[in-house]
Amino acid sequence: MARDPTTRYFAGTDRDRAAFEAGIKLGSIAHQYVGTPVTHKNAAALEKAIEASTQLQPLVERVRVKIDRKRMRIRGPYGYGVLSEDLLSVEVAVRVGKARAVGVLRYVPELDYPLMYLKAVE
Amino acid sequence: MARDPTTRYFAGTDRDRAAFEAGIKLGSIAHQYVGTPVTHKNAAALEKAIEASTQLQPLVERVRVKIDRKRMRIRGPYGYGVLSEDLLSVEVAVRVGKARAVGVLRYVPELDYPLMYLKAVE
Amino acid sequence: MARDPTTRYFAGTDRDRAAFEAGIKLGSIAHQYVGTPVTHKNAAALEKAIEASTQLQPLVERVRVKIDRKRMRIRGPYGYGVLSEDLLSVEVAVRVGKARAVGVLRYVPELDYPLMYLKAVE
Amino acid sequence: MARDPTTRYFAGTDRDRAAFEAGIKLGSIAHQYVGTPVTHKNAAALEKAIEASTQLQPLVERVRVKIDRKRMRIRGPYGYGVLSEDLLSVEVAVRVGKARAVGVLRYVPELDYPLMYLKAVE
């Protein structure tokens, strides 16, 4: 991170920032794309677009986005659904110096809630 | 449109509805995707995803989305930009019975404004 | 509309444009705010913000936004829901010259679908 | 956090989670509201709505949102602008057990970039 000109704005450690940046990516994905029309036809294109745009964001090492085809709710006279957080399964790894955080967004049935959590931080 | 169960909710003619539906599609695109990170790397994937999701919406006959690579503003320490209405060039054709409307969103330099307009209605 | 510099870009009549503009406003609302966290606590502030931002858009005469408190789905460990199209009830009137169009977005139970339709056009 | 049923999904410490949650909130705000029409007329209503919806999200202790009136770019034939990340100044404090993280989003002129950073973490 020696040459990253943003470093001097940050309190805390590289590890803190890794966790913070992982959170940013998940919050961004959830709120940018929710509401997009989706069916089996476009789900793959949408997954790819979300991955590609997330990959551009600061410090992203890798990202994988899956839209749950089984839980999609296709309905109405025109036969399509919309993307909701519940349909998203995202894993994003962020690297800051020697620290890395892996964040996950997935629907957790026991909580009936699309949880964002830290799967690993080191 | 004889079997479209939504027809009875509509005032006006098929032509009115075609114009209305063209407007919906342009408004939807502008407000769903603006803010997405974008560079030359992901612009094609994003165009494709916007087209594919718009194609699912009611009564769309065809849609074409272009992101203006020349006007993209890549900036900051991480070298990316975000999608704005000014970067979008969209043309969408909607068919309702025998009526058709073609709506356009594009940045109009003389107005310094990303205008949505009816290019054709018949 | 004599002095509206956008007029020359438009095909069709004032009535066509009124229908088109009503569609834009509904599409914009649906795709801008869907995904926003919502409960009884902030629903009124959110309704007001949506109305105020829509009022700024071209040619809007009046707009009314209601979020259906009864159909909100509050859930999960933190007790909140998110705005979906199904929760929105919007009526927007647009004026173009002597033409006026009134567009509505509301969940229609018989269709199990959040329908956008022209309530009036004249 | 003893009774928070989400705790067992998390790797790392309360401090890690506090940083992560602060990031989520900033990412969410940036990508939910960017693109909203804005002028002096509705900026206060929009600030209030963003604060109120953020307050609902998990573990938020306090949040303050300012839209920079001076940097707003009002333009075009209808005289309005749209919200961009550059116009937003956000500070959000998140509490997890005894840990607290304060995240900031603000435009940093030296970087020409709307930076999200950790202002404090303890």
Image: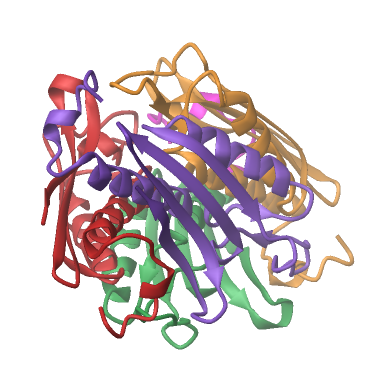
Chain colours: A green, B red, C purple, D orange
Magenta residue span:
A1-17
Residues D14 and C121: in front is C121
Q: Position of residue D111 (x, y in %)?
A: 39, 21
The residue shown at (83%, 65%) is D4
Q: Verify whether residue A16 appears in magenta.
A: yes
User: Is residue A88 placed above or below D17 in the rendered structure?
Assistant: below
Residue at 64% across, 44% down: C46
Q: Quadrant of residue A50?
A: bottom left
D119 inside magenta stretch = no
Classify residue B81 by image quadrant. top left
Between C26 and A66, the one lying in front of the other is C26
Quadrant (top left, top right, bottom left, bottom right) of the C terminus of chain D: top right
Query: Where is residue C83 shown, x and y percent of the image?
Result: 60, 58
Please indicate, yes or no, whether residue A14 appears anywhere in the rendered image: no
Q: Is residue D95 above or below residue D77?
A: below
- In the picture, which quadrant includes the N terminus of chain D? bottom right
Q: Is residue A101 visible?
A: yes
Q: Is residue D87 above or below residue B106?
A: above
Q: Residue D35, position in %: x, y?
A: 41, 38
Horizontal side of residue C44 vs B50, given as left or right: right
**In screen coordinates, is A87 left or right of A121?**
left
Judged from this view, the residue extending furthest toward the right is D2
The residue at 45%/81% (across/down) is A68
